Image (tube, helix red, strand yellow):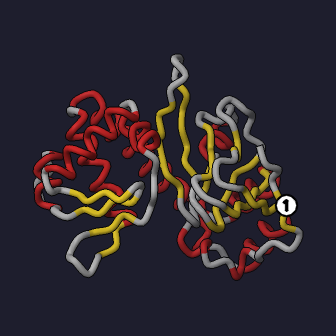
Amino acid sequence: MAEVTTIMQAKDCKTCQSRLMGMFCALDDPALSELNRGKTTNMYKKGQIIFYEGNRAYGLYCILAGRVKLYKTGIDGRHQIVRIADPGDLLGYRSLFADEPYTATAESLEDSTICCIDKNTFFPVLAKHPELAMNVIKKLSAELRAAEDLATSIAQKSVRERMAELLLMLKEAYGKATKAGGISISLELTRQEMGEMIGVTPETAIRLLSEFKKDGIIDVDERHITITNTKKLLDTARIDI
């Protein structure tokens, strides 16, 4: 595994554009300066591990650039991706608050720059800024709902419906309109990663995407997916609008 590179001159929290997309957006300059003094900034290559499931949480991580997947490992060794994190997102804070080991492994989906904030720096800032605490509560609530939705989907929906639902989620989060009238998904995932997001094997993910392409719902060019018929995709996922 490649060595993690530490950036000696890290971007100041006060001028970080990714902060505006995350939970630190409401903090004042003194609080941001306090966070800035207690953080380190590292560069991770695609596929590198930021932290492992089961390791003790000593701090939290803020994504400055890049994307990270968080996955749990089952007793059979298979992975279940539980979240894709983007710039501005925090990682590991739930385990930090609960004073328990990380419940998932974080791996970079692409070359990423990530700041680590020690708990001895973060907790005093959190205690002095109720607006930050409220943002944390909102984020935890949203993640709990997403986890409940995922569990319900896996338990009650067919694999075809789950794949359609995944593509709709990716469309909302990463979709860009094309000149031809479709929606291009800017996040490139392997078939294995897509399968891990909905609890199926890579072979099943490949088969489902081939069926969707044959049905005129999507267009596939290697890892690049374009949704060509949103209505059919909604019908396949059994979602009413």
Residue nearest the observer in this picture, 5 or 102: 5
Q: Amino acid at mark 1?
A: Thr
Q: Is residue 93 left or right of residue 210?
A: right
Residue nearest the observer in this picture, 207 or 138: 207
Element at badge 1?
strand
- What is the quadrant of residue 54 in the picture? top right
Residue drawn 45% across the image and 57% down it: 188
Q: Is residue 76 left or right of residue 198?
A: right
Residue drawn 26% across the image and 59% down it: 219
- Expressed as whole percent of the image width and height from the top left, the position of residue 128 reads 70, 63
Residue nearest the observer in this picture, 4 or 52: 4
- Residue 32 lies, with reference to residue 223, above or below; the image says below
- Residue 227 lies, with reference to residue 83, above or below; the image says below
- Expressed as whole percent of the image width and height from the top left, the position of residue 239 reads 15, 50
Residue nearest the observer in this picture, 83 or 140: 83
Pick out the residue farthest to the right: 8
- Expressed as whole percent of the image width and height from the top left, the position of residue 119 reads 77, 50
Write down the residue under mark 1.
6
Residue drawn 72% across the image and 56% down it: 44
Residue drawn 33% across the image and 39% down it: 205
